[in-house]
């Protein structure tokens, strides 16, 4: 019952990460905003999560499971209500940020609970079950959004979530028990400040690059990125030198954890960028309705839901390496195919491409994450979970911002330099196709790097087993 309640809460929260993707064109029309501004409804959501998650290792140790879960769901519910009644883009963004504040706490909390109560040999199956939610929710978000936006106002996306969130809060209040031990660690304000400036500055800088303020050479882009990089360097130094770090970065001394984290960051960049770019492209360039754009995503979401527990059992039996090699190969191939989409590409072909993309992601995400955390000793579980979750979300935000920027800048350059004689609407569509091709080719290149890294992944052995082997060898 404990895990079921938490899974339902996480499902609703993570669903909102991609729920607005198909609805963005209508929201942009209603509020009269550009794509680069509308992008902040997704990027800002991920940014808040990325800034907040580093604190979750502290919060998980400081507060009980029950109080932390109720607090997170409360924030998410308030944000959902604010977004539903938002009169303008500013208030809608505030609602999204409140939602993100709750979401940022929920997934690390759920993962830590699972690793605290499930033995190592069964964690693949347990995380596979959770993967139904973690991967299925963002995958079906565009489909649900498309169906609703086709017939109703985009506000229904929030009004529909609100009662589910309230039901989760009621059940959690009545049934949720505490399973983790609480301590009284001290929080380091300097670490918190450096973390916020670091992750926030980098994401803000990347996002600003697509807003037309001089491109990558402008101060609005370079200054935040520079502040972010310097802050993260100082943050890293401080975590390694204080007695109670906000995030214990010594998790990176474990080789499998390092490689797995890199792979997950790249996959997250590919997944969220594709989930954002594809619906916009389908509607604005290929002329599909929101419903048609959403339905293209549906088979992929179903495949993810079916395959997550199967991949979990395969992980328990064979480990993560071959799942990652095959899955990353599928992802890379699909991104290459997306880069080849033209105006004549059939609807069914795009649907097949997206389904293969989601199949590949389901084979990589949860097995690789489970493999990474399995290598850590139990005291580092909260820190490992927080680090992975932070870097995943920041990678998603940076990847989305970077690829939207590349699409926007490449399309603009095409419009300025082309000598093709076409009417304005046709020229804009051709420019978007060129921009999308550049964005997906970059995503392909990143995934190719992750595939190479996956060749060196090994199966994790718990620290307890390693100690037993060493003792046996010395005896």
Image (spheres, rainbow, N blue to C red):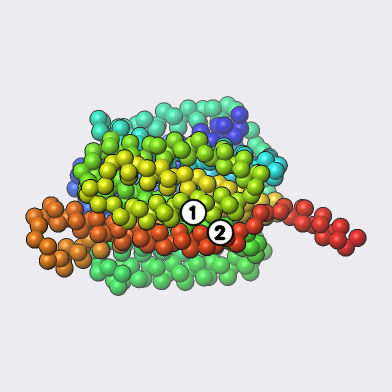
Q: In this view, does 199 lie above or below 350?
A: below
Residue highlighted by disc 2: 454
Q: Which of 226 and 95 is in front in this view?
A: 226
Q: Which residue is drawn at 38% across and 45% down?
A: 354
Of callouts 2 and 1, which one flags the residue occurring earlier in the amino acid sequence?
Answer: 1
Tell me the distance, in whole angstroms, between the alpha carbons under discs 2 and 1: 8 Å
Residue 248 x/y as whole percent: 62, 60
Q: Which of 363 and 236 is in front in this view?
A: 363
Residue 177 x/y as whole percent: 64, 33
**Side of 182 where 221 appears, left or right:** left
- In the picture, the quarter occupied by the C terminus is bottom right
In which quadrant of the rendered view does residue 418 lie?
A: bottom left
**Side of 184 where 439 appears, left or right:** left
Q: Label 1: how many residues lie within 10 Å, few (<14), some (14-19) or many (20+)?
A: many
Element marked by disc 2: helix
Residue 431 x/y as whole percent: 20, 58
Q: Are marks 2 and 1 in contact (CB under 8 Å)?
A: yes
Q: Nearer the viewer, residue 70 or 124?
A: 124
Q: Which residue is drawn at 70% across and 51% down?
A: 378
Q: Nearer the viewer, residue 432 or 109?
A: 432
Q: Is residue 48 in view from this perspective?
A: no
Residue highlighted by disc 1: 328
Q: Residue at x 48, y 63 (%)?
A: 449
């Amino acid at each position: 019952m404990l895990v079921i309640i938490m899974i339902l809460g996480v499902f609703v929260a993570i669903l909102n990460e991609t729920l607005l993707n198909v609805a963005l064109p209508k929201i942009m029309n209603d509020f009269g905003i550009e794509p680069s501004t509308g992008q902040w409804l997704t990027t800002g959501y991920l940014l808040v999560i990325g800034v907040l998650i580093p604190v979750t290792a502290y919060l998980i140790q400081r507060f009980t499971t029950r109080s932390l879960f109720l607090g997170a769901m409360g924030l998410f519910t308030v944000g959902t209500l604010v977004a539903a009644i938002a009169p303008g883009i500013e208030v809608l963004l505030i609602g999204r940020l409140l939602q993100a504040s709750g979401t940022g706490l929920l997934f690390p909390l759920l993962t830590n609970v699972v690793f605290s109560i499930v033995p190592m040999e069964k964690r693949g199956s347990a995380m596979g079950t959770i993967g139904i939610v973690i991967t299925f929710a963002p995958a079906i978000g565009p489909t649900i959004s498309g169906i609703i936006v086709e017939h109703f106002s985009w506000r229904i996306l929030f009004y529909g979530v609100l009662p589910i969130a309230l039901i989760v809060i009621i059940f959690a209040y009545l049934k949720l028990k505490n399973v983790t031990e609480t301590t009284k660690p001290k929080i380091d304000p300097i670490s918190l400040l450096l973390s916020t400036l670091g992750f926030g500055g980098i994401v803000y800088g990347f996002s600003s690059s697509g807003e037309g303020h001089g491109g990558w050479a402008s101060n609005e882009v370079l200054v935040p990125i520079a502040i972010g990089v310097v802050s993260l360097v100082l943050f890293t130094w401080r975590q390694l030198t204080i007695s109670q770090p906000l995030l214990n970065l010594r998790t990176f001394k474990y080789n499998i954890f390092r490689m797995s984290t890199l792979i997950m960051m790249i996959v997250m960049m590919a997944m969220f960028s594709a989930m954002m770019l594809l619906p916009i492209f389908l509607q604005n360039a290929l002329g599909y309705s929101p419903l048609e754009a959403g339905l293209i995503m549906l088979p992929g979401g179903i495949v993810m839901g079916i395959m997550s527990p199967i991949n979990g059992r395969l992980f328990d039996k064979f480990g993560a390496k071959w799942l990652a090699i095959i899955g990353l190969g599928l992802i890379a191939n699909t991104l290459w195919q997306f880069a080849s989409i033209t105006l004549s590409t059939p609807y069914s072909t795009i649907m097949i491409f997206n389904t293969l993309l989601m199949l590949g992601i389901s084979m990589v995400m949860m097995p690789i994450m489970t493999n990474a955390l399995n290598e850590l000793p139990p005291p580092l579980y909260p820190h490992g979970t927080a680090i992975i979750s932070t870097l995943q979300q920041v990678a998603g935000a940076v990847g989305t911002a970077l690829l939207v920027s590349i699409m926007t800048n490449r399309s603009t350059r095409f419009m300025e330099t082309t000598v093709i004689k076409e009417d304005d609407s046709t020229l804009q569509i051709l420019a978007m196709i060129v921009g999308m091709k550049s964005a997906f080719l970059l995503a392909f290149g990143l995934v190719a790097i992750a595939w190479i890294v996956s060749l060196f992944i090994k199966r994790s052995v718990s620290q307890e087993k390693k100690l037993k082997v060493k003792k046996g060898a010395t005896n």
